[in-house]
Amino acid sequence: MTTLPNNIEIDITIKDEHWGEVINDINALIHNIIAKTLHNRLTGIESAEISIVLADDFFIQELNKTYREKDKPTNVLSFPMTEKDELKNPAIPFCSLGDIILAYDTISREALEQNKLLSDHFTHMLVHGCLHLLHYNHQTDEEAKIMEKHEIDVLTQLGIKNPYESD
């Protein structure tokens, strides 16, 4: 586990070696993405941890089937370990935010189909997954609008254009 300056520990597990082969210094990239996503969004927590699993379609499909009853792969799954109110409670010095699982096969296919750099699409999916750990959702149009705004803000800070705008 590596500790970020903001007392955020990230445990990275690589289950599909393609990740390390196609994205240079993936550990540093992940740390930068998580730091930017969490910046000013964890108001009551002194320190936290996140687990990131870089997997393949088979692995994520099993999780999707088990936990969401959807027997198909997806690009990212997030499993928050907190309740929404806990994230603003200064009495909690440490919390486990949860797990983010990303599927190489789906993310690389989507990047190709959408004519995006794999690293940019990966970054977007990791930001998206991290925001889910902070209890942002997109079940309604209003929730989606709020979540997308946060995604766009973080991606802009990382030098990535708005993924919701078409060329």
Image (spheres, rainbow, N blue to C red):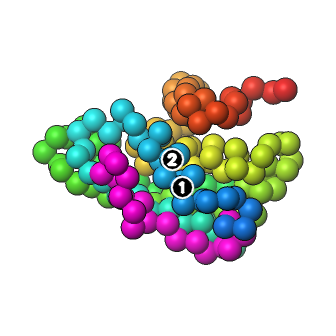
Quick one: 21 or 127, which is closer to the camera? 21
Q: Residue drawn 16% across and 40% down?
A: 90
Instruction: Give the residue at mark 2.
Output: 32
**Where on the picture, by quarter, is residue 40?**
top left
Specify the quadrant of the image occupied by residue 87.
top left
Q: Is residue 67 left or right of residue 58?
A: left
**Magenta-span inclusion, residue 5:** yes
Task: State the image coordinates of residue 18 (x, y, percent, origin top left).
Answer: 72, 69
The magenta region covers 1-19
Q: Secondary structure at mark 1?
A: helix
Q: Which amino acid type is shown beneath numbered disc 1?
A: Ala
Mark carried by residue 28: 1
Q: CA distance from mark 2 to mark 1?
A: 6 Å
| Kind of residue at badge 2 | Asn
Relative side of 34 to 167, left or right: left
Residue 14 appears left or right of 45: right
Pick whichever, 77 or 5, lies toward us.
5
Q: Position of residue 85 (x, y in %)?
A: 26, 40
Query: Residue at horizontal 56%, vertical 43%?
Result: 128
Q: Answer few, some or many: residues within 10 Å of disc 2's Cα (few below 14, many 20 plus, some between 14 and 19).
A: some
